[in-house]
Image (cartoon, helix red, strand yellow):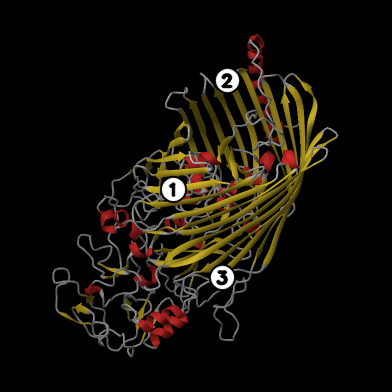
Amino acid sequence: MKNTARNPHVKQAAMASAVALAVWQMSQIGQAHAQEAAPAPAQAAVQSVMVTGSLIRHAADEGATPLITVKAAELEARGNTELKDLVLEQPQSLSLGTNTGAAGPVTNLRGLGPMRTLTLLNGRRLANEPLQDQYVSVNVIPRMALDRVDTLSGGAASIYGADAIGGVQNYWTKRGYKGASVKAEYASPEMSGGGQTRSLGAIAGWGELGKDGWNAYIAVDYQEKTPLFQNDRPGQHDPAILRGLGLGITPDSRNPSPTANFGFTRAANSNYNPTFASGCLAPYSVPVLGNASANTPPVYAPGCLRDPLFWTAVTDGSKITNVSGRASWNLSGGHRIDLDLLHAGFTVQKFRGMQVPGSTQPFTTYALAPSSRFYPGKGITPAVQVVGSNTGSNTPAMYIDPARTPGTVSNLNMNNRTLYFQWGPGELGPAYRNDEQTNDRIVLSAEGEVKGWDYRVGLNYGQSKRDTRVGEGYILYSRAQEGFDKGILNPFGAQDAAGLDYLRSIQASDYTYRLNKAFNQSVDATLSRGIWKLGGGDLTLAVSGEVRRDSARTSNAPLDYVLRKADGSYNIDAAGNVVQTDLVGETPSGVAKKLHRDISSLMMEIDAPLTSTFLLNGAVRADRYQDLKQTTVNPKLAARWQPLEQLVLRGSVSTGFRAPSIMDIQNPTPEVRTQLMDDPVLCPSAQPTVADTGNPVNGYTRDQVCNVLTSYWTKTPNNDFLKPEKSRGFSFGFGFDPVKNLSITVDYWGMKLTDVLGAVAIAEIQQNPAKYASLFTRNADGTIDHIVASQANRGKSRMRGADLALTYRFPLMPVGRFDAKLDGTWYQKYEFQAEKDGAWLSNVGVITNDGRYGSAGPNSGLAGLPQINPRWKHTASVTWNAGDWSTTLSQRYNSGLTDLTPRTGSTLTRVDAYSQFNLNLRYTGIRNTTLSVGVNNLTQEWPPLTADSVYTGGYITSLADMMGRVVRFSAEYKF
């Protein structure tokens, strides 16, 4: 006899059958009661609609799987000024740690990562973000045309395919629109500085489907958001203030700045600073004494630090422009044709601080000859004062004051030596790049009935583009060095008029250094009909098929600023990586290649209302991946039983599958990131993830191996060894209406993933350099060239929790109508293995700098740092309506955390809970006009403080922003 216990497909089917049988048996127990109950009063017919999570049309409240629907009007009432706010506050979507990338906000259902959440527009796919080719940013979703958002958490792979392991978020635009409307919004923080949001939208439509047989509308959205810098919130970011909060933050160390620290060799290039004594150069730099200056006994390393208040952006700038439209025609015989169009574009103005030469420039330092008019001690630049022996060939200590540096003071003997230094321009301001992304889609679909079968067919073509280009603040190395050689640029102070003009002339503004495109083409068809009568209605069968091609196109690295070798050829290695470029701060990247993946899918779904109170739903999907030469089959079984009019029980089990993306497997070039860090071998530290806390080993200088901008690869070319992930999930719960107008739903759910794809986190490598020694590629002198922190199948993940929703409509009162709503998620368990068959690590309600938490979890390689999973998260609101007036008070809440790894010297191990209240008031008493005014963050709460080193600024900015209290105004007029 065949051993079925070892067959996973048999086990899955057996589990599904057991759940269905159990619910069926419960239904028989309650059947007698249901038959004796008085018949329900007649109700108006409910129109069937397409419901997210099913191939079959349903009434919106009939499904066996929990579905969360939020109307566009509710988002506005909660103070959402962009869809990012929905992503941030939604209980079922978790933070991505300190991900400050430029891909735009993404949904992360169940904390499984955006690559496991499928984002749809009107039930069909969009082209993925092209660099990662794994997810879609909500920035491309049109707002003026938006009708509602459906969220189906948990396994949806049996209907939608492999990348729906975590769930589906489906954005539905209006089915039709007639008339015209314009809307303007403005939001501004109460405190001065940046962070303002300006929005303008319009929609216009013509024709009535029911009367004219056609309808067409077009909608336009435009939004612009200004950046917010630390200097705009000095009370929250001043290092001196933060050090007084017990966070264990050590004094700052000197670093490259517009008032350069210099040395006499390229390896020792920061020992002295001629402007330290005069306070460096505000607002660009400030004087510091070194991170060991508070030790006992103190160790001083004076110099200038680029002031983070000036250089660091808290929130980047952005622009969003979306144009969407739909044309619909009713044809004779009950057929309908729809044409959907979308052109979405958004730009993230990604601020990168001050850029200094790195490993891809000819040298990591600039040089200044003694003949320069800016050479210290020659009139323009003051001499450096030192104490002790000063021979012109040694390195005496720089003078601070008599108490800290006693001894004989003299001017540093320069001995006409060449100076070496790291430097960046101050007058150009913080460098920024513009990540310009577009997403275009056209869908032609038809639906109707033929010979008793409902049909839906669609042709879908989408493409996305990501054009990454430098903005202002990026300069060319050779031209800067030429400016120093000719005495035009001053490395130690403010530029004169000639120097400023020269700086502007050597910028590489609006230069594309990376270009990626992604495409999605598909044809789909669905047929459904009732097969035969059951006790509760028709048994309905749906069959569906889809043929899809996902493709990507990468471009060659632009050669404009790629340096040449001695033989005249471009300095690019055999794999296509740029080895040396003149552009300071970014490296041109890319190898021209066309990638594609063909996927053929067949789906079947059955809705079986066995009785008037019991519904059984089953679905199965088979996907054939041409490039992987694999076929995956994923079933789902769900049941819904209503033993009482006020009570519904439901449950489901499902499996899932996620293949590595084509960019995971076929990526033509490495994905290179950079980070300031200490070499964990040559500059070891007790806090290896905190830069500039180590000490160099013998034979190396601090400038060579400590606090160095280091490159690491999160993807390597040709990863065909990667295996697909697999998942199993379940949910069961109830909906209960104990009294009139009160509804309670509770759903307990769980999920397990195997062979989780994740990159090795750079923090894990820093903490375990011996274990990962093979991942270091070193230069001839032993310093790091780059680190390979690429993807692998890392282990397993498992999580369990519960979703809770409460709604209550109060009885009508003389002052108006009140409604209350709460939507929350509780995490019982979120565990993962850092490596295959490794120990299980828990990541609920904690924060840690342990590198394993950023490497093996489902978001590894995306967030870069550990994901934060609060034990409890909810949104709540109370709404009052009276005539032309309505008011909504809403709250979003995250429970507190325990810090497992606070900084050395700090005892702050508790991270407070976060709660934010928004208030919105709306008035419709003026004909065709809606006016709204609101306040976000009513009580001006700042993000929770943390002493964990993963958040260098002291605040958990992934849970909340630093805007403070924000006032909003909007006006809409309908023609």
Residue 443 as seen in the image, left or right of residue 579 = right
Return the x and y of residue 491 as percentages of the image width and height: 34, 79
- Disc 3 on helix, strand or loop? strand
- Residue 484, image quadrant: bottom left
Q: Which numbered marker is on residue 196?
A: none
Residue of label 1: 969
Q: Nearer the viewer, residue 910 or 311?
A: 311
Q: CA distance from mark 2 to mark 3?
A: 59 Å
Q: Which quarter of the image is occupied by the N terminus? A: top right
In the picture provided, is 902 more to the left or to the right than 213? Answer: left
Q: Which residue is mark 2?
A: 647
Which one is earlier in the sequence, the residue at label 1 or at label 2?
2
Query: How far from the left and from the top, in percent, is residue 176?
Result: 67, 43
Report the residue at 46% width, 76% height from top.
Answer: 475
Q: Do residues under tags 1 and 2 come within 8 Å of each other at their CB atoms?
A: no
In this rendered view, identify the residue nearer to me: 318 or 944.
318
Q: Residue at (71%, 58%) from the top-left corner?
A: 596
Amino acid bearing label 2: Leu
166 up-or-down from 706: above or below: above
Tell which residue pokes out farthest to the right in this image: 451
Amino acid type of disc 3? Answer: Thr
Asked which secondary structure carries label 2, the reply is strand
- Residue 923's spot in the image, x, y percent? 46, 39
Q: Earlier in the sequence, mark 3 or mark 1?
A: 3
Q: Quadrant of residue 149?
A: top right
Q: Which residue is mark 3?
A: 512
Q: Residues within 10 Å of mark 1 (few under 14, many from 20)?
A: some
Q: The residue under label 1 is which amino acid type?
A: Phe
Query: Which is more foreground, mark 1 or mark 2?
Result: 1
Residue at 39 percent across and 74 percent down: it is 424
Spatial CA distance of label 3 from label 1 is: 37 Å
Neighbor class of circle 3 (other Cα within 10 Å; few <14, some 14-19, many 20+) is many
